[in-house]
Structure formats: structure tokens, C-alpha cells
Amino acid sequence: MLVRAKPAASESTDVQIHSDLVETLFGTAGSFFAGLLGGLIAPALAWLLLGDRIYLYFVALIAVLGAFRLYVFFAHASTPVSLRRRDSLEWERLYAIGAVGFMTAVGTSVAVLFYNHYNDVLGIYSIVIMMSGLSGLAGRNAGRPWIVLAQSLGLALPLAIAAMMHEERRYLGLALIVVLLIVSIHSTTKFLHGNLESALRNGLDATRQRQKFSLALNSMTHGLCMGDADLSVTVVNRRVIDFFGIVAAATPIRLEALAHAIGKSVGMSPHESKIFFERWKRHVTMPRASIFTHKLGERFFEFHCERAEAGSFITVIEDVTIQKRALREIERMAHFDDLTNLPNRYQFQETLEEEMVQLRQRGFHAALLNIDLDRFKDVNDTLGHSIGDQLLSAVGARLAACVPHPHVVARLGGDEFCVLLRAGEHLPEVDELAANILAEMHRTFIVENHVINIGASIGMAAAPDDSETSGGLLKCSDLALYQSKAEGRGKAIWYSQEMQDALTRKRAIDTELRHAFLANELIVYYQPVVDSRTATIVSMEALLRWRHPTRGMISPGEFIPVAEETGMIIELGAWALRQACNDAKSWPSNVRVAVNIAPRQFQQKDLAEMVAATLHESGLEPDRLELEITETTLMVSDDVDSKLCEIEALGVRLSLDDFGTGYSSLGYLNRFPVKKVKIDRSFARQAIESPKTQAIISAISALARDLSIDLVAEGVETDAQLAFMASKNIFLIQGYLYTRPRPIEELRPLLKYWRAAPRQRGVIYVQQASVALKRHQAPPINPRLHHALRAKNRVRGVIASTELSEIALYRSGAGLWLDDVSNDQQFMGVFGGERPIALHETFGLDEAERPANRRVKSQEI
């Protein structure tokens, strides 16, 4: 092939213009073929008329060059446009070779013919052929002016030369005309070329703008339709076709036809398509911009319609299916709980409000059940939140199965659910439903092979009996739920006015307590802990009291729980600690002060710093301060070990209060640096009558002795209780037997010596009914037992003898000890006891060392 291939490349503007100009060379086929034929006329006619062989040669040369031009012409026509444009320089060169060569051959033949036959018709032929050839060059080949110039010179210059060489000078004018004609044609060609190139550039720019517009139009994420005032649509972008799957229709197209095509593509009925068209038509004819949303098939589309100039319109179509679904999901999330798919608090409150309106208008009744799961926190803490979430989902499913339609089950948040029994003329069996719910909640749950047992507490309120407003009904059910939990959980309790009254009192106490704290109405009372062996005070427990200006003394049981619930206990506890340390500073150095630390206080991160600062401000020695904590505090607080270690590092003693009422974990005594354990007062009340209680106290006493922990018996109120505690080696006593909590002013005189403190009086058992006690001059007594007594600091008496044996008599705060020296028998008299307790039971003698049992009688001392 004449044209060689070249690598494809992106065309610049100049290259594209050049390609377009080269294409114009091959654009006029009629004049091209006429020019080929016209070039043969003059030499062919001259050869036929004159028979001169030279003209035959010219005919042959012109024919060969014409054939070459035909070959180039047809080769160009058969080559793809993209390749022609790519090889435009090559095609220009081939065209120029054929055109210039052909014109030069024709011009030379015309010049020879004119020179030889200037007075003949053939001379006229030569001039006419030359002129006709020149006349067509500028119009047909203006795309490449240099080719026109070369053709003009080849065609006309030989004739001009022949005219100048003629012997008759009159032909010089002809030569001059020919030259001027060449100049004129060249000038005209350049002018035409400029206009042509400018038109091509403008066309190219317009094409590019149209391409950009089309690209932008079809690249839009929205569909676009543009139409005229007669509702004919002139522009439809590709997105519209993609949206609805319609076949691209030629524009313009009627809006009605487009609407029906869209309706048909999405499966709409003719009636539905007509409704869609009428709606679209109504919006595009509105004088202002408007928007409407229409569901087409399974998707939603938003049509933005706006009027333009001369009544034309523009419609932008947006697929808003995702947004619609997102809005629906947002709406669902706003009204429904993700875990359980039950209505959430917002939706439930709306429903409840609507029900209350119906209730008021129609005189109906409704009921509200507020449900809170028991032990759910334990599930989260032990099995993790993922299991907890699945458990909540299972709970929601069970509740929904328990409650029939049209009643409503909702999850308010966390582990709190609500059941609304919708308004009706009569309430359904609410108690029966509540019992069914409790049973379902107590039934075992299986979550990921975990066996989970929880429960529920329910608070119930009725409308309009309890409240006629949604907020009031929720509050009433909340109070009932609170009461259900306070009574031990796992119950369904109806709201009562007493609950509201209690809440009102609690709020009043909270308000007045804050005022009392600022008005210095709070005072610290103290209750001593007494060593019953010596009747001396070893420590005093600080107890907060409230002296109300009008109500008198308010019980701590009334305001301390409120302070703990509201968090005010932190301020009160810090104040009580400061007051107690300041008071204790003036006490004897052997008397400690004990201050209770509430669970909320213990959760403070800076508890140890607060205690240290208080000790520093008061000047109290750290080992004279005891902080009393309960098992509950240890269970609910975080970082217990580190906090207790920080407190112990200060030198402050720790006391475990109310021991035996909670879990009574022995691990606490081993794990934490506890120096003192206080047995709960309930044990002292049952110590005389309950053998089980006696056994427990014995075990605790032995454990405390082995761990070197001080043991205090709380709540001792009788001599019998005091004697029993002494028999179990419990000598630190706190209780009303000694004194109630009192102001420090009343207790201060007793700190050094308490003469009137209760002491043990009772019965001593001896061998005979008739006993004569007399002084004895240091009889020989059992050395080992005497040493044990002294080691225990127990010797407090004289030496005596009976008629049958010598007895050493020792008095202690806990009782009277007898040492039968002659028979190596030892007994202890115990107040309130029915038999003597052998000394080995106290000092742990071996079996071989135990005294023989003897029947004895008593003599009161």
C-alpha cells in the first residue's frame, strides 16, 4: 500500500486542523475529474488536427500523471478516516506530487501549442484551458495554499514565458496578465485558506465544547431532560436511560411519550403511567421551581422541575432510593431498639401519650408495667457485653410473646422494659400477666451455650387512678419498681400513695440536710468500745447525728441513706472525719477514734489523700485513727487493694464492721490489712438462746485469736451477753450495756477511769457446800498454769484454801479463777453458766493434763 502505518497518537489542535485541510483537497470529486479530462483536450486535439508527434507525447505524459492522481484519489477514499488523519502529511505530499506534476505538464503543452499556433484556434484553446485551470485552483485547493501556488506556476508560467519569447511584442501584455493572474490567485487562495482554517478551528472548538457538554451531561449522577414550551423533550442524557432501562429515543420526543416509556419500563399500568405523566406535566408548567417524588418500580426518584426562557423547561431526576431507605432506617432507629426490635423510649412515650388522650376522651382504663431485670449486671461483668446484648434480645422476644396484641412492649434502655396495656373499658388481668412475665424471666436462658438465670422486678401503675398523664404514670411505675427492688426483687408491686409520700419525705430530707450541713446542725456522737476485763474505754466510734431546730434529733437511719443515695455522704463523711480527729486529739493516748467510711466515700480516688490531709490538720497520730468499712464497701468498690494499702501506709488501722451479715468471706481477713473485726449486733441478741449462734461466735473468736485480730462484740445489752462473750474470749464490748451514743462532753470524764462500768458478778463452783475462804501464805500452786495465767495478764486476786484442798483464787474482768493446788484441779466461774468451764478449755491443755471431772457446789462471792 502507498500509505505506511504510524503509531497512534493524540492529535493537537494544529494537527487536527492540518488533517481537516488535507481532507478538503480530496473533497471535490467533480472538479477533480473535470480537471483531468480538461487537461487532455488541448494536446489531444492538436495531435489529431496536426499529427505532430510531440503532442502525442504530451497526451501520454498527462495521461500517466492523471492516472497517478486517480490512484491517489481512490486510495485516499478507501482508507479509514482515522488512518487518513493520522497520515495527513503523507497524503498531502502524494496529492502535491500528482497535482503539481499534472498542472505543469498541462501548462507546458499549452505553452508549446500557443507558441506554435498563436493565430490559430489551437492558440485560443491553449489560453482557455490555462485560464479555466487557474480559475478552479483557489476554490478547490485553498486548504493548502502552497500547492495552489505550485500548480499556478506550473500551469501559467510556461505560457507567460512563451508569450515573452514571442517575436511579436504585443504578447508581452499577455505574459503580464498571466503573472498578475498568478499573484491574484495566490492572494485569493490565502484569503480563502484563512477563512477555511478559522471556520475549522471554530468548528473544532464547537465540537469540543459539544463533547464536553455531552460528557458532562452523560456523566451526571442525575438524569436531565430539557424541553420546549410545547412539551417536546429535546435533550435526554444517558443517566435517564440508565435509571429506567429505556431504549435511547431520538429527540425531540413528546414528554407524554417519554413518561409512558418510563412507566412501561418499570412495570406501571397505563393508568399509573398517565398519573405519572400528569404529575410531571403539572410541575414542569408551574411558573416556579418545584419538586416531587415518585416511586417507579422498587425505587424512588425525585424530580426537580424548573422553567427556563421562552417557556422551555428543565427537569433534573435524582435517584433517592438510598436516601429514602436511610431515612426510613433512621426513623426506625429513632423509634425502635436495635437489639430487640421493640419500640424504644421515644416511640413508647409517643404511644403512651396518645393512649392517655384516648383515655381522657373516652373514659377508658390503662395500665403500665415497668420491668427491670435482676442480676443483669452480673451477666455483663462475667460473660461480657456481647452475651448481655444477646440476652436482652432474648428477653425482648419473651416479653413480646407474653403480651398479646394490641398491647405494647418497649425497651426503654439498658435492662429496663415497659409494657403498656392499652386503654379499654376494663383493665385486663394485670396481675396474671405480671406473674406470667416474672415466670418467663426466671426461666433459664441459653446464650451461646451459657446457662443464664436472671429474674425481674415489676412496678405497676394504673390510669387514671394513679395518674392521668404519661409522665405521671411513668413516675408512678418507677416508684413501684423501686419498692419492688427494695423488698427483695422478683416481685410485681402496684403503686401506692405511700410511695410518693416516702419520695416526698426523702426529697425534703435531702433539702433540709443540705441546709443543716451549712447551718452546723450536724453533730458527732460517740459510742465507746470497752475492755470488759479492765472496764476501760479503748476506742470510741464516731456517729453522725442531726439536731433539727424544730423536729429534735433525727434518726441516722432516716437521713444517712438519703445522703448515700444523693452523694452528699462524701461531704458529710469528710466533715465527720475532721471533727472526730479534732476531738480525739485531746483524748488519752490509749483511746482511739473509729470513723465509718461509706461505700460512696470509699470509691473516691483521693480517699487516702483526704485522710492524710485530715490527720495533718488535726495533729492526730495515725495509729489512733480507725476507719470502719463494711463487706459491702469491699464488694462494690474498685481498686480495693490499692486503696487499703495506701490507707495502711499512712499508719491508720482498718476495721471490718458488721462482720457476719454479708458474705462474711474469710478471704477478706487474709487479703486485706484488717486489724479489727466487729461482730454484728444480731449475734449478741441471739447468743444466749441459739446454739448455732454460739458455735459461730466461738469459731469467729478462735479465728480472730489465731490471726491476731482484735474482736469486738457489738450490741451487747445484758450481763448474760457480756458473760457469754467473756467465755469465748471476747472482751472488747460495744453496746447499750455500757452506754448509748453520747456527746463527747458526757463521755470525756470516763476516758481515764470508768468506775461505774459494768463488771462481771456471778457464781463460783467449789467442792463442798460449806466453804471457808481464808488467806493463805503463798501456797505452792501449779507453776505451769500460774505462768500461763501471768502470760495472759489474767492474775487479779488472792490465794485461799478450803477444808479439803488449797485453792488459788484469781479475779479478772471476765470471771474468777480457782486453782486446786493439792489435786491439780483448775476451774473458772462463769456468770450465767450451768457448769464450770475447765481451765484447759481456755488455755488449751493437752488431754493428759485435763483435770478430772468432779461434782461441785457453789458459793456466791
Image (cartoon, rainbow, N blue to C red):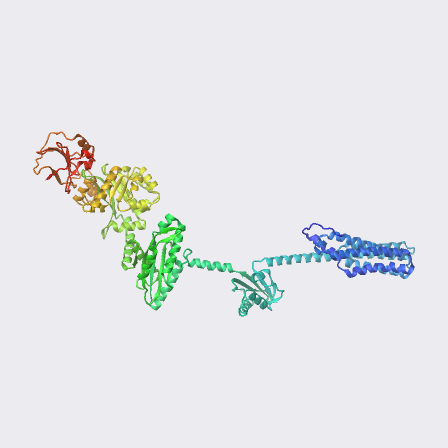
Residue 566: give x, y in percent of width and height.
Answer: 32, 51
Position of 461 compared to 740: left or right?
right
* Between 768 and 262, the one nearer to me in the picture: 768
Can residue 491 be seen by looking at this rendering?
Answer: yes
Q: In this picture, is 683 found above or below 343?
A: above
Q: In this picture, is 359 found above or below 665?
A: below
Residue 303: give x, y in percent of width and height.
Answer: 54, 63
Residue 244: give x, y in percent of width and height.
Answer: 56, 62
Quarter of the figure with residue 759: top left
Position of 394 compared to 45: left or right?
left
Residue 161: give x, y in percent of width and height.
Answer: 87, 54
* Between 320 and 708, the one nearer to me in the picture: 708
Quadrant of image for the C terminus: top left
Q: How many marks?
A: 0
Task: Please report the residue visible at 60 percent of the width from the left and 58 percent of the height from the top.
Answer: 218
* Between 22 and 300, the one nearer to me in the picture: 300
* Between 261 and 850, the one nearer to me in the picture: 850
Can residue 175 be seen by looking at this rendering?
Answer: no
Position of 367 compared to 812: left or right?
right
